[in-house]
Image (cartoon, rainbow, N blue to C red):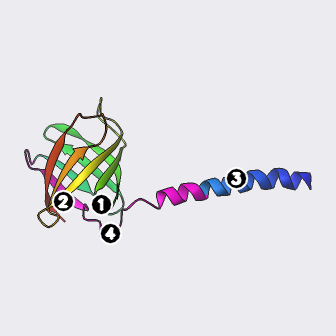
Amino acid sequence: MKTMKRILLPTLLLVVGLMALTACGGSRNVSSDNPLIGQWAWTQASLWTYTFNEDGTGRRGGAGEPFENFEWWTSHGDSRLHLRISNPQPGVAPDQTWDIEWAENNNRITLSTRGAFIADSTFTYTRVIN
């Protein structure tokens, strides 16, 4: 009986922990109808782009800079963008959060920083590919 308790308690804790992690992951909004899916070009220099894939992966870069790969999701009714960059450039935070302001029938977005990795920066992008 004591042996069963020694096995049951750690197993139960593991299952509860996995359920909690799954619940947190479930709040990520990366559905096939997410308005960010597609390719976006920076309005100041179309050589810098973001690509958001349906599977929650993406890529950004251009203008002579190496591309960075990331996982992405939105929250707060698609008004907040979260990035987890797998290969950040030196000095770039791997975890980033941006506020999204939508315009022109969801074909233009303005991303504003939320955090200290770039002080008070705002960038506007136009949809290139759906």
- Quadrant containing the C terminus is bottom left
Choose the circle earlier in sequence order: 3 or 4: 3
Q: Position of residue 30 (x, y in %)?
A: 36, 62
Residue closer to the observer: 89 or 118:
118
Query: In this rendering, which labeled residue sits more in front, label 1 or label 3?
Result: 1
Choose the circle earlier in sequence order: 2 or 1: 1
Choose the circle earlier in sequence order: 1 or 3: 3
Quarter of the figure with residue 22: bottom right
Could you tell me which secondary element the residue under label 2 belongs to?
strand
Q: Is residue 90 above or below residue 29?
A: above
Look at label 2 and name its amino acid.
Answer: Trp
Query: In 3D space, how far apart are the residues under numbered discs 3 and 4 (Cα atoms)?
Result: 34 Å
Residue closer to the observer: 5 or 66:
5
Query: In 3D space, how far apart are the residues under numbered discs 2 and 4 (Cα atoms)?
Result: 18 Å
Could you tell me which secondary element the residue under label 3 belongs to?
helix
Pointer 1 residue: 78
Pointer 2 residue: 102
Pointer 3 residue: 13
Q: Position of residue 4 (x, y in %)?
A: 86, 56
Pointer 4 residue: 32
Choose the circle earlier in sequence order: 2 or 4: 4
Could you tell me which secondary element the residue under label 4 belongs to?
loop
Kindly check if marks 3 and 2 are in contact, taking CB atoms under 8 A apart as contact: no
Query: In 3D space, how far apart are the residues under numbered discs 2 and 1 (Cα atoms)?
Result: 9 Å
Write the residue at 60% across / 59% down.
19
Look at label 4 and name its amino acid.
Answer: Ser
Q: Is residue 68 left or right of residue 16?
A: left
Residue stretch in magenta: 19-46
Label 1 crowd (10 A; few <14 / some 14-19 / many >=20): some
Label 2 crowd (10 A; few <14 / some 14-19 / many >=20): some
